[in-house]
Amino acid sequence: MKLLFPGGEHSPVELGGGRITVGSAAGARVYLTAAGIAPQHAEIEAKGDICTITVLHPGNTVAVNGKPVEGSADFRAGDQITFAGVRARAVAVERASAPTVPNPRGADVDDDGRTKVRVALPKFVLRGVSGVTFGKVFPVQGTMVLGRQSECEIPVPSEEVSRRHAELKVTPDGVMVEDLGSSNGTYVNDRRVTRQLMKSGDELRLDTIRFLLLAPGQEAPTRVAEAAPAAKSAAAGDGGKKTLMWAVLVLAVASLAAVGAKLAGLY
């Protein structure tokens, strides 16, 4: 597992081989100088696929997936760790294996044995279908918070959305959504919920802001399925209009002919 810093505050850090110290002290393994980082801020210890982060002083701010850590907490690949205002993401890694097929040209193989980072694809995505998030796609991994605050994993800058509105958590059976005491409520398929398991294809609504929960491969077929009936309906509508226009024209010609015949009879 590696710790990546999307903001560039530190180079990627491989987690393993003992305890790793995070802080602003010169001897810290993860040396961070941002505001709020203590000299000895936190300590990370890897235990296989799980890492434990320990806060080294009660005043130091550390959060895992937006939840403050008091004492110690475990995290896994896909989770987000925040040190004061510095965000980091834990990602799974796979060690490059030696080639099994001989090089037919006898060329040197460029394999330095370094661990290569592979970020796992999300099982679900949220696609915005209304409001300020329309057309945007948000990967759903681990535990994430939706809300008006920019610190949320899925920020929704809209006044009708609470600062920390709802929490999403990926489970083996789907995505569990939990309302965090919002003012305007959280809805799944237009039903207000406090806690509800969502499946692929379900709609999530925060007041007037709507999302669709989809598997990554579902998104393109969904658009095609929506577009096909619309195109067919449009074509049918155009054909109906043309038929109506011809009928009106024929009736008008027939009426003029009848009037002409009557006038001829008079004279």
Image (spheres, rainbow, N blue to C red):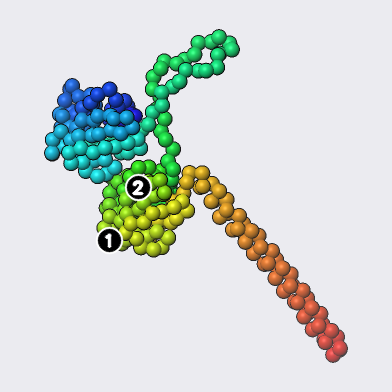
In-front residue for pair 266/119: 119
At 46% from the left and 51% from the top, the residue drawn is 200
Residue 211: percent from left, percent from top: 42, 53
Residue 144: percent from left, percent from top: 33, 46
The answer for how far apart the CA atoms under marks 1 and 2 are is 21 Å
**167 relative position to 245: left or right:** left
User: Mark 1 touching mark 2, by CB under 8 A?
Assistant: no
**230 relative position to 79: left or right:** right
The amino acid pointed to by label 1 is Ser
**Is residue 33 something that shows in the picture?**
no
Q: Quadrant of residue 97?
A: top left
At 27% from the left and 52% from the top, the residue drawn is 164
Residue density around tag 1, few if under 14, some if 14–19, many if 20 or more, within 10 Å: some
**Is residue 196 something that shows in the picture?**
yes
Residue 110: percent from left, percent from top: 47, 15
Residue 15: percent from left, percent from top: 30, 27
Q: Residue furthest top?
A: 106
Give the vertical position of 91 relative to 96 (above or below).
below
For disc 2, the marked residue is: 169
Q: Quadrant of residue 1?
A: top left
At 40% from the left and 56% from the top, the residue drawn is 204
The amino acid pointed to by label 2 is Lys
Disc on res. 183: 1
**78 relative position to 70: left or right:** right
Q: Quadrant of residue 260?
A: bottom right
Q: Nearer the viewer, mark 1 or mark 2?
A: 2
At 40% from the left and 45% from the top, the residue drawn is 172
Give the vertical position of 248 relative to 94 (above or below).
below
Q: Secondary structure at mark 1?
A: loop
Q: Tell me which numbered mark, 1 or 2, is placed earlier along the sequence.
A: 2
Q: Secondary structure at mark 2?
A: strand
Residue density around tag 2, few if under 14, some if 14–19, many if 20 or more, within 10 Å: some
